[in-house]
Amino acid sequence: MTLTQGNTIDFDSARLKLSENASTVAVLPAQTNLISLAAVQDKLTQSLQTSLELDRILELFFQELRAYLGLDCLDYRLEGRNLHHRIGQPSLHRCSYRMTHEGSFLGEIQFGRKKRFTEAHLKTLETLLGNLLYPLRNALLYREAVYCAHNDSLTGVGNRLAMDRALDREVRLSIRNRSTLSLLVLDIDYFKQINDQYGHACGDDALKAVVNCIRNCLRGADDIFRMGGEEFVILLGDTAANEARMVAERIRCAIEEMQFQTDGISIPITASLGVATRRPDEGIREILDRCDKLMYCAKRAGRNRIAAQ
Ligand SMILES: Nc1nc2c(ncn2[C@@H]2O[C@H](COP(=O)(O)OP(=O)(O)OP(=O)(O)O)[C@@H](O)[C@H]2O)c(=O)[nH]1
């Protein structure tokens, strides 16, 4: 029979709260080696200071606990942030903890091992979880800070900084591997009218809808960035000119056919796109400028179209 015990650790009150159906924690048995537990805690304190990366923190924590408690698996989840890390193989006996700190939920962590957990094991585990608290919280804050630094808060796509970095990387890759690299610059047509007629909030929703629409037209590896306002850049790695034109046309059609509604009113949305494929002598700025100019060509030619070169 699989044993799963669920506990809640409220780090704020520095005590353990066991959920209703969990058994109470036993006092540490006399034979438990307190010195080695303290040594493990010291080691954890030192090693967990060495990184701010969540996966590294969990890996380091697991390595210590595996050696000390014979664990086979650590499974960490944070719903809502779409985080899930599993280290090791799932095991028959499991215990899990929901961790909170200062009112913030820090995720659920589950441990597995072949042998059942004794009360002494659980007590030790819970003591060691105390060492994970601040490194885990810092890793989550760091992750959030990195995300905010690179993503547009409205649409969730990469921002300008992320775009510059990705373009730099892709141009280098394209030179090194002699692969083709294509770029799309997309600008929504007459976007100001949507804002003016239906309000800024509706404009925001339209931007999100357009991003979803673009996403549905792309492969997972392709990147979308918001340059600012209602202008987006789409990076198509390893993509030749004719394929890039096809992708651009697919996106243009999908946006035109998108059923965007506000308060039951259907609002037609179209976009103009520039399509450029990197030439051998072109750096990041050159290809981006050329693609931007092509997008303006599409605007001047009547909008809701693509211009490629
Ligand atoms: N709702 C909303 N509007 C934005 C945002 N960023 C920029 N805008 C608006 O986007 C509009 C852009 O207008 P214009 O540059 O005149 O372009 P346009 O109306 O799309 O016209 P063309 O590009 O020439 O087809 C402006 O009204 C900006 O205020 C945003 O984050 N949310």
Image (spheres, helix red, strand yellow):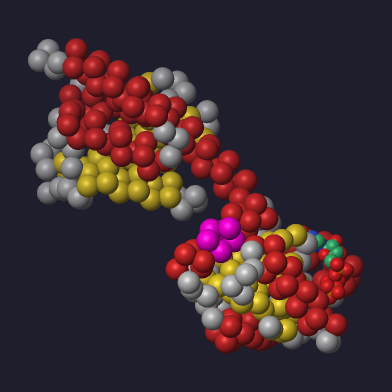
Percent position of residue 270, x then y: 75, 81
The answer to whether 113 is drawn above or below residue 169 in the figure is above
- The residues colored magenta run 166-172
> For this view, does 141 lie left or right of residue 38?
right
Percent position of residue 113, x then y: 16, 41
Residue drawn at point x = 30 percent, y = 45 percent: 75
Spot the residue most to the right.
196
Overall secondary structure of the magenta section:
helix
> For this view, does 130 lie left or right of residue 102?
left
Q: Quadrant of the C terminus?
A: bottom right
Percent position of residue 240, x then y: 54, 81
Percent position of residue 166, x then y: 57, 58
Q: Can residue 19 be seen from the camera position used here?
A: no
Residue drawn at point x = 35 percent, y = 22 percent: 45
> For this view, does 50 lie left or right of residue 24?
right
The answer to if 171 sits in the magenta stretch is yes
The answer to whether 177 is drawn above or below residue 155 in the figure is below
